[in-house]
Amino acid sequence: MDATDFPDDLVQMQVAWNATYDALAAPRPRDTSALRRRLLLLSVRLRWHPYWQPAPSVQAARHELRQLARARGAVRAA
């Protein structure tokens, strides 16, 4: 599966999930309840996104999505 196959909204959700997770994992995060709620909401949306319905290898596709999102997140942070 090619990285360009992912819908942009799915990649953006994964980037947001990564950023929220990183914010929650930071030392002494502020408003942890809001961060946890956001992480849960994003997790549910990622899990039930329509893209995953026809995917032949969901686990491999999710791994590829995480890698793509980390790469995009790193580019934005730089």
Image (cartoon, rainbow, N blue to C red):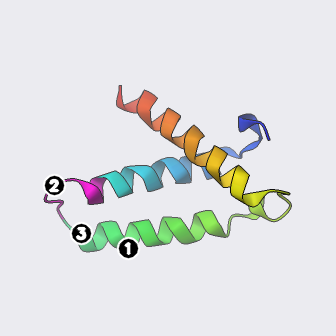
Q: Which mark is residue 32?
A: 3
Element type at mark 2: loop
Q: How many C-alpha atoms fall within 10 Å of the one at disc 2: few (<14), some, or many (≥20)? A: few
Q: Main secondary structure of the magenta part?
A: loop
Q: Quadrant of residue 54?
A: bottom right
* Residue closer to the observer: 55 or 30: 55
Q: Residues within 10 Å of mark 1 (few under 14, many from 20)?
A: few
The numbered dot on residue 28 is none
Residue matched to label 2: 27
Question: Camera-side residue: 52 or 8?
Answer: 52
Magenta span includes 3: no
What's the amino acid at mark 2? Answer: Pro
Q: Nearer the viewer, mark 3 or mark 2?
A: 2
Quadrant housing residue 49: bottom right
Q: Amino acid at mark 1?
A: Arg
In the image shown, does 15 or 67 lie closer to the viewer?
67
Q: Earlier in the sequence, mark 2 or mark 1?
A: 2
68 vs 55: above or below: above
State the CA–CA distance, disc 3 to disc 1: 9 Å
At horizontal 33% and vertical 52% (from top left) the residue drawn is 22
Looking at the image, which residue is at 17% across and 62% down?
30
Left or right of 53, for residue 12: left
Q: Secondary structure at mark 1?
A: helix
The part of the chain drawn in magenta is: 23-30
Q: Is residue 59 left or right of residue 25?
A: right
- Of the pair 50 and 21, the residue shown nearer to us: 21
**Numbered disc in front, either 2 or 1:** 2
Please state if 2 lies on the left or on the right of 19 as rendered.
right
Image point (67%, 70%), residue name: 48
Give the residue pinned by disc 1.
37
